[in-house]
Amino acid sequence: MARLLLLIWSLGPMLWQLYSSFRPSEALSGGGAGTGWTLAHYQQLLSGDPPFLTYLLNSAVVGASSTALTLALAIPCAYALSRLGQRQARSVSAVVAAAAAFPAVLLFLALLELARDWHLANNLLALSLPYAGLCLPLAILLLQAAFRDIPIDLEEAAQLEGLSLWQRLRWVLLPLITPAVASAALLVFIFCWNEYPIALTWLSRSELLTLAPAMARIAGSSVFTIPYGAFAAATVLGSAPLILLMLLFQRQIISGLTQGAIKG
């Protein structure tokens, strides 16, 4: 019974948004005139200018490029950190942990100046630069723990077989930490999918907006009425890709997040 109540409590907001997305606007506004079910909110989003799917595609492009860049930098950094001496690794890890805990909002003005001076505004791929920088410390810490769990004897055996450093990393080590890589990739992707202030200021063209600033525009699209139905439909469409990713890779994600927590 307790598990059922917890499940209902957890899924309640999602189920309410799903329910609201199919209800007429009159019923949601409290007028009581609307009855039955409707697809009008979804039709409004999908037929907009630009269509709502454009925002989802933009977020997917930004998330994929940022995740690829973050992993490309984090994997070699995490490997090098895991092979340092214990005292050196502890010092460097403390610096990386401090960077991961640093409030990203304090960098907002600096990033805004960089976007203006380097002409990075209205460029989806350019968003991968600040996003990767913000996600890099956490990804390094997560992957470092996974690399540290791999016995050094295994790598030495591969070295005796004539494999170079990059070959050992590619063919021996990376397959063993696939769950940790999947976890880091998903965490980075979720951050990029939901990030709001940087995307809001770096992107001003409607056709280039990502999901978060597009949702803000929908919520404030009317002065006199709140578009509950359209916002609920946008929430459902915006959440669906992340839910699908979590369902597809939940086993790898759980394994990656717990890797290194249990020894023996």
Image (cartoon, grey):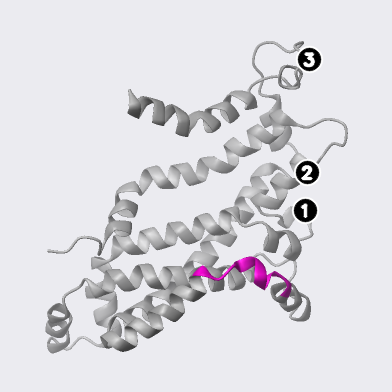
Q: Mark 3 points at which residue?
A: 31
Q: How far apart are marks 1 and 2 (CA)?
A: 9 Å
Separation of marks 2 and 3 at Cα, in angstroms = 29 Å
| Amino acid found under the numbered disc labelled 1 | Ser
Badge 3, how many Cα within 10 Å: few under 14, some, many 20+? few
**Alpha-carbon neighbours of circle 2 within 10 Å: few (<14), some, or many (≥20)?**
few
Residue 3 — which label?
A: none
Q: Position of 5 compared to 69: left or right?
A: left
The circle on residue 49 is 2
Q: Which mark is residue 206?
A: 1
User: Looking at the figure, which quarter contains the C terminus?
Assistant: bottom left
Q: Residue at x 52, y 40 (%)?
A: 240
Q: Is mark 1 on a helix, strand or loop?
A: helix
Q: Which residue is drawn at 72% across and 30% down?
A: 228
Q: Give the range drawn in magenta.
A: 101-109
Res. 255 image quadrant: bottom left
User: In this rendering, would 28 be left or right of 69?
Assistant: right
Q: Earlier in the sequence, mark 2 or mark 3?
A: 3
Tell me the CA gap for discs 1 and 3. Answer: 32 Å
Mark 3 residue type: Gly
Q: Answer yes or no: is residue 60 visible.
A: no
- Amino acid found under the numbered disc labelled 2: Asp
Q: Does the magenta stretch include residue 203?
A: no
Q: Where is residue 56 in the image (x, y as percent from the top left)?
A: 61, 48
Instruction: Pick whichever, 264 or 210, lies toward us.
Output: 264
Dividing the picture into quarters, in which one does residue 226 lie? top right
Please identify the dominant SS of the magenta region.
helix
Is 45 placed above or below 181 here? Answer: above
Which comes sooner in the sequence, label 1 or label 2?
A: 2
